Amino acid sequence: MCANRRAWSLAAALLLVGAPAWAQPAKHTPTVPLLIGAGEAEAVIRLGRPDIARREAGGAVWTYRRPSCALFLYLRAQGPDLRVTGAAAGPRRRGQPAPDTNACLAAVAADKR
């Protein structure tokens, strides 16, 4: 019960002061340079949950699949958190040209799941 009271107190405080900048929706389309250095929570807020999240020693690769492309988000451990270090886009079908990474990123952000 005490934990619930703390959670409600925190929620009320956030309503009064406003949510932190990373918890507010992006006002513009994200690009790779804007995501570099973002933590896991910020990446999920901007892009939604990944379709595939593969952890490896010291990092992770998140995959977002959309009809027009597949976005690969690379994260590396920095302290206790993972931070975005890069991104790449690939075609959904063999033989198709690789899409522009920022265009794929925009498609993922527009269709957050």
Image (cartoon, rainbow, N blue to C red):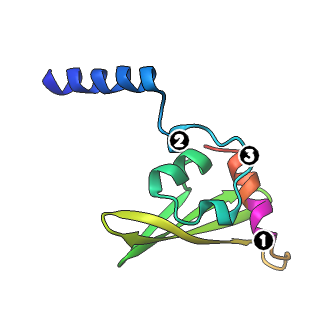
Q: Which residue is mark 3?
A: 28
Foreground mark, 3 or 2, reads: 2
Distance of mark 3 from mark 2, alpha carbons? 14 Å
Categorize mark 3 by other alpha carbons within 10 Å: few (<14), some (14-19), many (20+): few
| Disc 3 element | loop
Main SS category, magenta section:
helix
Q: Which of the 4 quarters of the picture holds residue 98?
A: bottom right
Using residue 73 as the reference point, say whether residue 53 is left or right of it: left
Q: Which part of the image, by quadrant, shows the N terminus?
A: top left
Using residue 62 as the reference point, say whether residue 13 is left or right of it: left
Instruction: Residue 92: tell me if it is visible.
Output: no
Where residue 70 sits: x, y (%)?
A: 69, 65
Residue extending farthest to the left is 2
> Disc 1 vs disc 3: Cβ atoms closer than 8 Å?
no
Instruction: Residue 1: tell me if it is visible.
Output: yes
User: Which of the two residues, 111 or 21, is positioned nearer the viewer here?
Assistant: 21
| Disc 2 element | helix
Q: Callout 3, which amino acid?
A: His
Identify the disc placed on residue 21.
2
Earlier in the chain: of badge 1 and badge 3, it is 3
User: In the image, is residue 34 part of the stretch drawn in magenta?
Assistant: no
Using residue 78 as the reference point, say whether residue 30 is left or right of it: right
Q: Which residue is mark 1?
A: 93
Q: Callout 2, which amino acid?
A: Ala
Categorize mark 2 by other alpha carbons within 10 Å: few (<14), some (14-19), many (20+): few
Q: Which part of the image, by quadrant, shows the C terminus?
A: top right
Distance of mark 1 from mark 2, alpha carbons? 37 Å
Question: Which span is picked out in magenta?
Answer: 99-104
Residue extending farthest to the front is 17
Where residue 35 sits: x, y (%)?
A: 60, 60
User: Which of the two residues, 8 or 51, is positioned nearer the viewer here?
Assistant: 8
